[in-house]
Each structure stands twice: as structure tokens, then as C-alpha cells.
Image: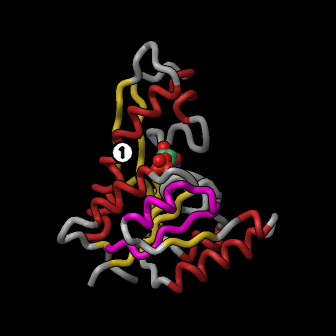
Amino acid sequence: MSLRVAILISGGGSNMVRLLEDMAEPGHAGTPVLVLSNTPEASGLAKAKGFGVATAVVDHKEFGKDRASFEAALNETLKKHGVDIICLAGFMRILGAEFVAGWQGRMLNIHPSLLPKYKGLNTHQRAIDAGDDQAGCSVHLVTPELDDGPILDQASVQVRGDDTADDLAARVLIEEHKLYPRVLREFCENFVPH
Ligand code: GRF
């Protein structure tokens, strides 16, 4: 039985594209059933449609400060599509403890740093400012604390002396595109429903 995977995005969705490409390969234990964005402007939505994957928008702006209702709407949409596993891929909303608890062990995220370093934003500039010689990305299970859950795998890149944050982000993104599909593939193969 194939696992039903939803990918949550907010932007261009380059990681989403790589996940969709990989799940299209024969023998993958996951099937993409939904790409969901919290904003109608996410250009990744059109790319998902190009793959023939169902898309949905749950616009956080319509809920104002009412995060509980936003998350209830997210869950309703995920349930409608029979989702087993969530991949956050550039999804720029913080999810509350209750929502996260409902998806414990079934929600993955990619973060552009070598966690536990540099949780949150501006990861590349912070790595440069700290004089780190390695930067990278991590795929982890999502827990209520931001960017804090068990790390499933990481990939590193060398920081160069003249790197800007954009330079580093571009090289890390290349690694993200290899890491996330590989981790999702292994995760689906070893997934034991509870
Ligand atoms: C990636 O760097 C990801 O690690 C971060 O946001 C960026 C999303 O890029 N969380 P994309 O939308 O997958 O192109």
C-alpha cells in the first residue's frame, strides 16, 4: 500500500518539485496526493498542477490571528485527501503544538542549516557571521519546538571566504534537492503506521 504524501509550501517549491520527481519513480513507497499552500501567490502551486497533483490553498490571512481555526482548516483539507505523511518544504508558518501533536512522527521538514545550529531564519548569514567552515541542511521530524525535532539526515557544504548569504543559499539548495528526496524515500520505506 502506498503512503499518501502531502507537501506544504509557501513559495517557489523547488524542494517540492524534487520530491514530486522522486515519487514519480517506480517503486517509491509514497504517492503525492496534495500540494497545499498557505498563500494563493505561491508559484509552486502551478508547478504541482504541472505534475498532475491536486492542490489546495488554506490562506492564513483569512484567519487573522486565529491560528487554531487556520490549523483546523489545514487538518480538514489534509483529511479530505487521506494524507498519511506531511512534508514541509519552504512552508513559512509556525504550526502550533496541537497540530504538530496530531502529526507526530508523520511530519518532516527541511531546514537550511546544520541543526541544531541556526534554528529559525537567516541561517546562511548567521553561519557566515559565525565564521563556520561548514554549512548545510537538515531533514528532521517536526516537534512542537521550532526546528528542533529528531534529525533524520543532513548534508554539508564548505563555506568559502567570499561567500555572500545568497551564494551559500544557492549551494545549500543544491544539497537540499538531493537530501530531501532521499530521506523521504527511506522514511516511506521504513514507515510503520501506528
Ligand atoms: C529552502 O531553503 C528550505 O530549506 C527553506 O525554505 C527554502 C524553500 O525553498 N525552509 P523552495 O520553496 O523549496 O524552493
User: Is 79 included in the stretch rendered in magenta?
Assistant: no
126 up-or-down from 32: above or below: above
110 up-or-down from 143: above or below: above
127 vs 136, left or right, is: right
Quadrant of the rendering where the C terminus is positioned? bottom left
191 vs 101, left or right, is: left
38 up-or-down from 81: above or below: above
Query: In the image, residue 88 lies at what x, y percent?
Result: 49, 60
Query: Dot 1, how many residues are within 10 Å of its Cα: few (below 14), some (14-19), or many (20+)?
Result: many
Q: Residue at x 57, y 80 (%)?
A: 77
Residue range in magenta is 31-50
Residue 111 appears in the picture as rendered: no
104 vs 69, left or right, is: left
Q: Circle 1 — which element?
A: strand
Quadrant of the rendering where the N terminus is positioned? bottom left
Amino acid tagged 1: Gln
